[in-house]
Image (cartoon, grey):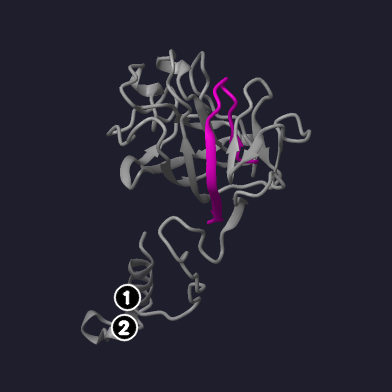
């Protein structure tokens, strides 16, 4: 129930106010005041409360998925997948969040479908937003760029061109688990690609496996993970806000 409706109902039931006695201030509150957050100086730059995960300098916020030193490379301000070295994950753990991440597919060359520019953004290490070259690249739509992998196709293909930077803004509400790990509330996700809404408050059905159906297994805050899928996808300007 909305907070104002709860307040109104409580006051009416308690006989504190009749419907005729309402004043504007009866449904106003002033505390707690939201914190002041300063936006980035330009569109897409981290706001004042963001955790900067990659600023073009080093991999100090990352480790390999095996908790070893991250083996991806940093070149000209870009974090680039070194195929065959495995994925990377953040040292920090996250739950509800707002994530900004920019990526660029390598030259298309001879590869097509899932073999072209493939990587993935894994929220809490297990829920994948697909990264893939979407420039004239035919594949299954629930595995194309912008999909919640094997669950939800994007509502539009907002990818521009191979070799150009693509921008994801992801809004994530983590799943909630109760006693004995029982799922109480599934995860929800909203995604924009290059400013275009492609996933609108989608209710996530569970993890995003390559084979099989999604399932939920109880967990708490977990690292953000980026996938090594055998192609040299580049990343830049990665930041996250805890919500």
C-beta proximity under 8 Å, tags 2 and 1:
yes
Q: Secondary structure at mark 2?
A: loop
> Hey, which quadrant is residue 179 in on the image?
top right
Q: Is residue 124 visible?
A: no
Residue 9 appears left or right of 96:
left
Label placed on residue 12: 1
Residue 17 appears left or right of 208:
left
The residue where tag 2 is placed is 17
Magenta stretch: includes residue 189: no
Q: Quadrant of the N terminus?
A: bottom left
Q: Position of residue 6 (x, y in %)?
A: 37, 67
> Hey, which quadrant is residue 49 in on the image?
bottom right
**Position above or below: 11 against 104:** below
Earlier sequence position, callout 2 versus callout 1: 1
Q: Residue at x 31, y 83 (%)?
A: 17
Classed neighbour count for the residue bearing mark 1: other residues with Cα under 10 Å, few (<14), some (14–19), many (≥20): few
Give the magenta-colored segment's residue range: 223-243
In the image, 128 versus 60, the foreground residue is: 60
Q: Residue furthest right?
A: 68
Q: Position of residue 81 (x, y in %)?
A: 60, 30
């Amino acid at each position: 129930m909305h907070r104002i409706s709860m307040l109104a109902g409580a006051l009416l039931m308690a006989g504190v106010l009749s419907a005729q006695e309402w004043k504007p201030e009866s449904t106003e509150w002033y505390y707690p005041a939201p914190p002041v957050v300063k936006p980035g100086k330009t569109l897409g730059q981290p706001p004042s409360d963001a955790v900067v995960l990659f600023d073009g300098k080093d991999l100090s916020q990352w480790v390999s998925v095996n908790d070893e030193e991250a083996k991806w490379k940093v070149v000209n301000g870009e974090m680039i997948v070194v195929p065959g070295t495995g994925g990377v994950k953040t040292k920090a753990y996250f739950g509800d969040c707002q994530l900004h991440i920019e990526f660029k597919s390598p030259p298309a060359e001879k590869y097509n479908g899932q073999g072209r520019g493939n990587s993935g953004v894994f929220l809490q290490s297990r829920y994948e937003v697909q990264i893939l070259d979407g420039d004239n690249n035919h594949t299954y739509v629930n595995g194309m760029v912008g999909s919640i992998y094997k669950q939800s196709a994007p509502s539009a293909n907002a990818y521009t061109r191979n070799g150009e930077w693509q921008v994801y803004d992801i809004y994530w509400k983590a799943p909630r688990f109760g006693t004995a790990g029982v799922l109480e509330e599934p995860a929800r996700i909203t995604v924009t690609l290059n400013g275009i809404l492609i996933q609108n408050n989608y209710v996530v059905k569970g993890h995003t496996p390559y084979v099989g159906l999604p399932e939920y297994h109880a967990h708490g805050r977990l690292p953000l993970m980026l996938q090594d899928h055998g192609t040299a996808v580049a990343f830049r300007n990665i930041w996250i806000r805890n919500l």
